[in-house]
């Protein structure tokens, strides 16, 4: 048994190599891998001994040689292949143990240069893995240290089943595909390249998808943005709600006060701003005292004991905060099914490309990350909003962006009052928001309203004004804008156009 070893990730490689030698294997290795194995007292030949050619170009060229690749690619059932190996004095390999330069880890470092990134693009390693994976009936490709023990178990029996060989080949090709996708994405100069390279690492199996009869799994680096401090594993819906809650709460800067959002089925059911986390909670909770049960709570400040005590009075699925006071953590952990997540990094500063599955492919769009400061706000009525109305409009506009369309949000300067989501007409969404406010015992007198898209008719504005709204923010752009503006002017209300809509489906 002849084995080629060339690994960047050297976890467990010494023990694995020693076990192979004990089973009678001959090892061939490269550079630092060879030095590590020799320092551990493990005999290994160098690639240069095999090829009769030194490593050159600072190690860029070492394994790209017929003496290596012919030994990997030769089919053992082809007499002509075996004849050519013998003719050129090439010995076949039975196993290739390779993992690649740390390209992803390199580009994740702040301020990394293009030259530094390019140096971490592995060429020889990818070629070795692909060669071994192509010839998997005869050559075992190993890319992950977690496979070392299962491979050893089979080698000790004297037979490695074809199905397991194919499994290792699939892992090798998936690894190189993800590696190439990462490079392509890094070098791409467009969100929409001619070929869309998508590759995410398997993260964990989920108990089920949206419903118990649907299987589901999580891929990618979701848990580089959140650390789970307590509770059972997140479900498919939990993950969707967590992302929605954190995206919304990141609309509010800590300098504006403590912001807290309560989410249900990815829709906000209340947002509040206060001087303390408890005050923000009270204002958010008051919007809809029923919906928060079983909901997701996100806050942009440390969760202190007062907030924890208020949250603890109801059942909530998830609490997300940048940190938790020890006393708050102790209290919230008393309910075993409540998940507690520490936010580690801004989710709105991550992916700029959103992907949605459709039959036969995917839809790709740029993420809707435009900050409120980028919106071209234009007063279109005779009366301009007062300072307080403008503050309230800014809050409502940031919230309505995260409500499923058709979306309507009534608010004041520091809290939402009524939210209408996902109705087939904008008037219906407004009526739902009014009804929710009435159910919560909240007055809409002197409130403001935000609409995620234009009002096609004046009736939507008339409903809002009759409910007590005095100022409205909306994109504008309807063929009946004049009628809509006239309705606001007739009531003495202020209206602001943003010129930008925020549909959310």
Image: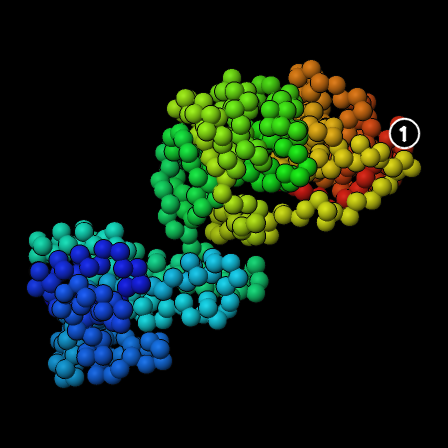
Task: State the residue at coordinates (70%, 29%).
Answer: 414
- Please identify the quarter of the rendering in which residue 409 is found: top right
* Residue furthest front in the image: 326
Task: State the residue at coordinates (48%, 37%).
Answer: 342
In the rendered image of this protein, does residue 78 appear above or below residue 53? above
- Residue labelled with disc 1: 492
In the rendered image of this protein, does residue 157 appear above or below residue 294? below
- Please identify the quarter of the rendering in which residue 274 is found: top right
Task: State the residue at coordinates (31%, 68%).
Answer: 125
327 and 501: which is toward the camera: 327
Q: Is residue 275 left or right of residue 26?
A: right
Task: State the residue at coordinates (53%, 64%).
Answer: 188
Q: Is residue 96 left or right of residue 231?
A: left
Q: Position of residue 155 (x, y in %)?
A: 12, 56
Could you tell me which quadrant the C terminus lies in? top right
Q: Position of residue 10 (x, y in %)?
A: 27, 59
In the rendered image of this protein, does residue 51 appear above or below residue 379? below
Query: How many numbered circles does the render carry?
Result: 1
Could you tell me which quadrant the N terminus lies in? bottom left
Alpha-carbon neighbours of circle 1 within 10 Å: few (<14), some, or many (≥20)? Answer: some
Query: In terms of secondary structure, where does tag 1 sit?
Result: loop
Q: Position of residue 416 (x, y in %)?
A: 68, 27
Q: Position of residue 121 (x, y in %)?
A: 40, 68
185 and 162: which is toward the camera: 185
- Please identify the quarter of the rendering in which residue 447 is found: top right
Q: How is the image coloured?
A: rainbow
> Can residue 83 be seen from the camera position used here?
yes
Q: Is residue 503 left or right of residue 157?
A: right
């Amino acid at each position: 048994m002849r084995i080629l070893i060339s690994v960047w990730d050297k976890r467990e490689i010494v023990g694995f190599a020693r076990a192979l030698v004990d089973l009678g294997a001959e090892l061939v290795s490269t550079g630092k891998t060879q030095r590590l194995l020799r320092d551990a007292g493990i005999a290994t030949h160098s690639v240069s001994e095999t090829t009769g050619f030194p490593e050159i170009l600072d190690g860029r060229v070492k394994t790209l040689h017929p003496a290596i690749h012919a030994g990997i690619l030769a089919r053992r059932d082809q007499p002509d292949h075996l004849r050519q190996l013998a003719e050129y004095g090439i010995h076949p390999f039975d196993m290739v143990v390779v993992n690649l330069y740390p390209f992803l880890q390199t580009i994740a470092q702040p301020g990394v240069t293009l030259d530094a990134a390019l140096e971490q693009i592995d060429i020889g390693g990818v070629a070795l893995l692909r060669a071994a994976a192509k010839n998997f009936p005869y050559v075992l490709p190993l890319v992950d240290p977690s496979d070392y023990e299962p491979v050893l178990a089979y080698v000790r029996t004297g037979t490695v089943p074809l199905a397991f060989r194919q499994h290792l080949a699939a892992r090798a090709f998936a690894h190189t595909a993800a590696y190439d996708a990462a490079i392509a994405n890094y070098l791409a100069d467009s969100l929409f390249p001619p070929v869309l390279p998508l590759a995410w690492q398997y993260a964990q199996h989920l108990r089920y998808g949206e419903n118990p009869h649907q299987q589901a799994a999580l891929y990618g680096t979701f848990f580089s943005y959140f650390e789970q401090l307590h509770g059972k594993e997140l479900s498919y819906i939990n993950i969707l709600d967590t992302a929605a809650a954190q995206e919304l709460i990141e609309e509010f800067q800590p300098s504006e006060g403590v912001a807290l959002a309560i989410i249900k089925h990815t829709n906000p059911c209340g947002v509040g701003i206060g001087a303390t986390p408890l005050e923000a909670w009270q204002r958010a909770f008051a919007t809809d005292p029923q919906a928060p049960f079983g909901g997701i709570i996100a806050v942009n400040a440390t969760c202190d004991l007062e907030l924890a005590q208020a949250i603890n009075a109801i059942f909530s699925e998830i609490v997300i905060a940048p940190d938790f006071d020890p006393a708050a953590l102790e209290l919230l952990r008393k309910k075993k099914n409540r998940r507690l997540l520490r936010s580690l990094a801004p989710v709105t500063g991550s992916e700029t490309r959103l992907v949605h599955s459709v039959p036969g492919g995917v839809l790709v769009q740029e993420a809707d990350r435009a900050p409120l400061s980028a919106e071209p706000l234009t007063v279109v009525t005779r009366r301009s909003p007062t300072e307080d109305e403008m503050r309230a409009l800014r809050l409502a506009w940031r919230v309505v962006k995260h409500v499923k369309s058709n979306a309507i949000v009534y608010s004041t300067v520091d809290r939402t009052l009524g939210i209408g989501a996902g109705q087939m007409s904008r008037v219906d969404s407004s009526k739902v928001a009014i009804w929710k406010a009435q159910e919560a015992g909240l007055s809409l007198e002197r409130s403001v309203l935000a609409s995620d898209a234009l009002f096609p008719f004046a009736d939507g504005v008339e409903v809002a004004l009759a409910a007590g709204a005095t100022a409205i923010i909306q994109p504008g752009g309807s063929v009946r804008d004049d009628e809509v503006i006239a309705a606001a002017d007739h009531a003495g209300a202020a209206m602001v156009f943003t010129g930008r809509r925020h549909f959310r489906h």
